[in-house]
Every structure is written in structure tokens, then in C-alpha cells.
Image (tube, grey):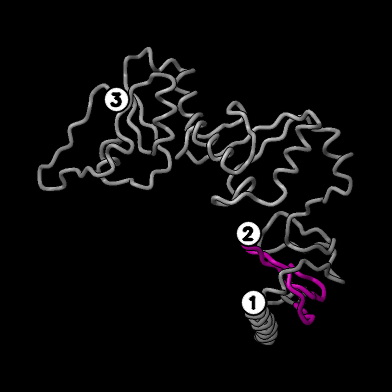
Amino acid sequence: GIKENVSTVCFKSRDLYFLVTSKKTKLNTSSLKNTNPQNDNNKTTTKSSTMKFAASTTALLATLFANTSAFTVRQPSTVGALRTFGASRPFSHATKPLAANVLKLSEPHKELLDTVDVFIFDCDGVIWRGDSLIDGIPETLDKLRKANKKMFFVTNNSTKSRAGYKKKFDSLGLDVPAEEIFSSSFAAAAYLEQTKFKESGKKAYVIGEIGICEELDLIDVPYIGGPADSDKQPNMGPGGKLEVDPDVGAVIVGFDRMVNYYKIQYAQ
């Protein structure tokens, strides 16, 4: 349905359309619409025009995938709105890169510190990287505390309990109270406590490390598995069977560097 000179061809990764600048290629759709099927000359003209357009489009696709610098949306000079391959969403006419438009805070004190009361930090890659403290973190936390801001530190790494993470903060010279630390190991234990799992008389099976076990100990929920099952192997032979404890009422799965077939078989 392109009725005018076109300087772009559209493709996108998910919906198959990007815009790429190219030489103008003309496809006269009026000649297609007015073609008489019984007129051989018209058939030849239509076929020729279509083949030229297809060949030009193929060349543009080759350029697109060979040159990633072409991934920029550009405004066509003669096309009012370009829709592609049945897509219902027209492109914006504004020239813009294919990237998120995130505004930079020009006045952090005015635009952030004066309007935000609670700050939630991820840990790995934000507070530390491996066992090394990231530059600027002590000064940032000190400034926030002096401004009476509340802070919480969250992580989806369940290998440590809150006590384990408290020791890590201390080793990095950061004075962070345990009540400001929220790990996924603590979240799992908190869920069992809130749902009154202990009152069921059941126990939990753990695929994970010591962090989950330490948090379960704090709420007196019995468990099996975890590090204790790291060296166990199931009977994988013919007729092999793994006996499981009928009192297991929950399975908790976290990051486990010693996961094995025994744990997976038991958990299922």
C-alpha cells in the first residue's frame, strides 16, 4: 500500500520492522489496481515493477543486517504514515534512536532527596561487586542517613540469611542494621510463618544453601535436605525408587551450587 516515493523500509525485531534509510524506490500501486488480468502487457509491466521492488527490498535487508549502525528511526520525507506488513501501529514521525528515553536528574537534591523518604537498594552490583565495595557507597549511605531517609537492602540471593548478609555488610565497613536487610531466604521463611505452616506439623524440603536453613531455624520450622543432601544419589537403575518422607508439606527452592538429581527427584 505504498503510494509515493519511499526512502525507508520498515522492520522490527518482534513485529518485524525497523526503519532504514535507502535510495528512493517507487512502486506505483495504481498500475497494480488498474491492471486488466486479460491484458498481457499490463501483466508484464506489473510483474516487472513488483520484481524490481522486491529486489530493492532484498538489497536493503542485506544492508540492514550487515550494518547495525542503520538501526535508527528516520522520518520519511514523502510518506505521511508508514504501516508495515499488516501492522496496525504507525511509526512516530520524530527522529529518535531505538533506545529507552530516560531523563537524567539535573538537580538530584531538589528532584530526588527532597521528595523521596525511602530508598531500596539491590546489593550485588549496587552495593558490592563480589567481595569488593563499590566506590561512593559509604558516602551515599551516610548522606541519606543524615537526611533521615529510610533504607532497605534487598537481594534475591538465598545463599545467606539476614545474619550472613549482616556479616558481609560489616566486613565491607558498612553499618547496616539487620532489620534493613531483606533476602529471598528470609522472604521464604516469612511466608511460611505468615501462613502458619508450623501449625500443620509438616516439615519443609530444601533445595538451597545454608541461608534458607538458618532462616527456618529462626522460626522453628523443621526441614530436611539442603546442604545435607549434596552428596546423595538416587537409585537410577531399573525399578529404582526413592522413598520420601510423608511429612514433607512444602518445598523451598533457592540458588544451590550443589544441586543434584537426588534433590530434584526428592522435591518432585
Q: Residue placed at 33% from the left, 26% from the top?
A: 223
Real-space CA distance between mark 2 and mark 3, rounded to the nearest whole angstrom? 47 Å
Q: Is residue 84 left or right of residue 233?
A: right
Residue type at tag 2 = Asp
Question: Which element type, helix, strand or loop, lies under badge 2?
Answer: loop
Query: Mark 1 or mark 3: which is in front?
Result: 3
Q: Quadrant of the C terminus?
A: top left
Instruction: Give the amino acid type for the residue marked by disc 1 in the picture.
Output: Leu
Q: Which of disc 1 and disc 2 is earlier in sequence?
A: 2
Nearest to N terminus: mark 1 or mark 3: 1
Disc 2 marks which residue?
15
Which residue in the structure is indicated by mark 3? Answer: 248
Label 2 vs label 3, nearer the camera: 3
In the picture provided, is 43 more to the left or to the right than 230?
right
Magenta segment boundaries in residue numbering: 1-29
Q: Of label 2 and label 3, which has the lower sequence position?
A: 2
9 left or right of 234 in image: right
Q: In the image, which disc is placed on residue 61?
A: 1
The residue positioned 26% from the left and 36% from the top of the image is: 266
